[in-house]
Amino acid sequence: MSWKTALVCALGRRLRPGWSASALVGLLEGAVLLARPRRAVALGNLRLAFPEKTAEERRALYRGCVRHLAWSAVECLVLDREPRQALEWVEEARGREWLDRPRGEGKGVVLVTPHLGNWELCAAWMAQAGYPLCAIVRPPDDPEDAGFLEAFRERSGLKTLDKEAPMTRAVGVLRRGEILGIVSDQHGGPKGVEAPFFGVVTSTVPGPSVFAHLTGCPVVMVESWREAPFRHRIRFSPVDWEVPGDREARVREGTARVNAALEGAIRRHPEQWLWQHRRFVEAMREGHFFEG
């Protein structure tokens, strides 16, 4: 792993909820705020998503997002020592029946989520609570840091599937009556489906609707958010993606409905979403994206 990650991990081994965690959050927050390219992307995204807000309000949202990400990193470092703490930190999990009911009938569940709240903690909680979750993941850009993240997920009990793995493996997860997790709020690239997101038509990951179409499994969204450091809530809710038509029409409309559900969750907790991601690539090609 990189020396920066190694240093943070070394500090993390000594962490406990309290002043030491708050101190590390301050250090991480300051480091992220200095990353100007990501700041420009985040503010451009916020400008698209919330045109009614002033520039100062959007900058405040960005600062809140950075602090949230710093707390998420610190929570994961503390959680890495004892993954079962996830069961204590998640104070409420509503809507579990949307997972339990289909699984009681032998069906799998397509579980979608945005990069909202502490999504790694949410996955760890599900694994520790006994849910057979297998998440489709994209390896980190820095391969040296991938080992830490893989080890963290393995210790928490989460199974993962590389996004480049054959589709049949993901279908197999659902056929076995397990839960297939997809973080589907990132840009879909050239293979994505165009769908509205915060009022912008943009390439979107079609995976949730594709897998639901192929298997007949329901689509459920999990929304997690932080109430305070080391205190979280989770809510599961169904996504009505069933529409008539051929596969292309069903996937396109289903993807739009998934986007609408994700957008609703993000609007409820805007300071806890990953605004630094290049989500609106199409808009970024326009000259006014980075203004303000």
Image (tube, rainbow, N blue to C red):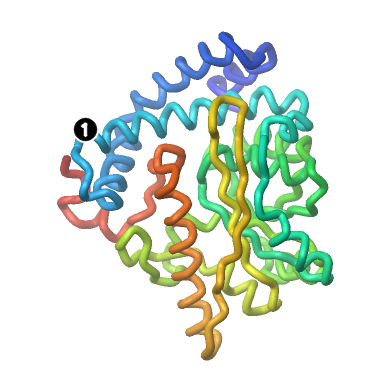
- x 34%, y 58%: residue: 198
Residue 262 in view: yes
Q: Is residue 112 above or below residue 90?
A: below
Frontmost residue, 142 versus 247: 247
Q: Where is residue 142? Give x, y as percent.
A: 54, 37
The residue that label 1 is drawn on is 56
- x 26%, y 53%: residue: 284
In the image, is 145 to the left or to the right of 100?
Answer: left
Q: Is residue 86 above or below residue 243?
A: above
Check disc 1 and report its element: helix, strand or loop: helix
Q: Quadrant of the N terminus?
A: top right
Label 1 crowd (10 A; few <14 / some 14-19 / many >=20): few
Residue 291 placement: quadrant: top left
In the image, is 145 to the left or to the right of 105?
Answer: left
Q: Total number of numbered labels? A: 1
Residue 162 in view: no
Residue 35 placement: quadrant: top left
Frontmost residue, 148 versus 58: 58
Q: Where is residue 259? Give x, y as percent.
A: 45, 63
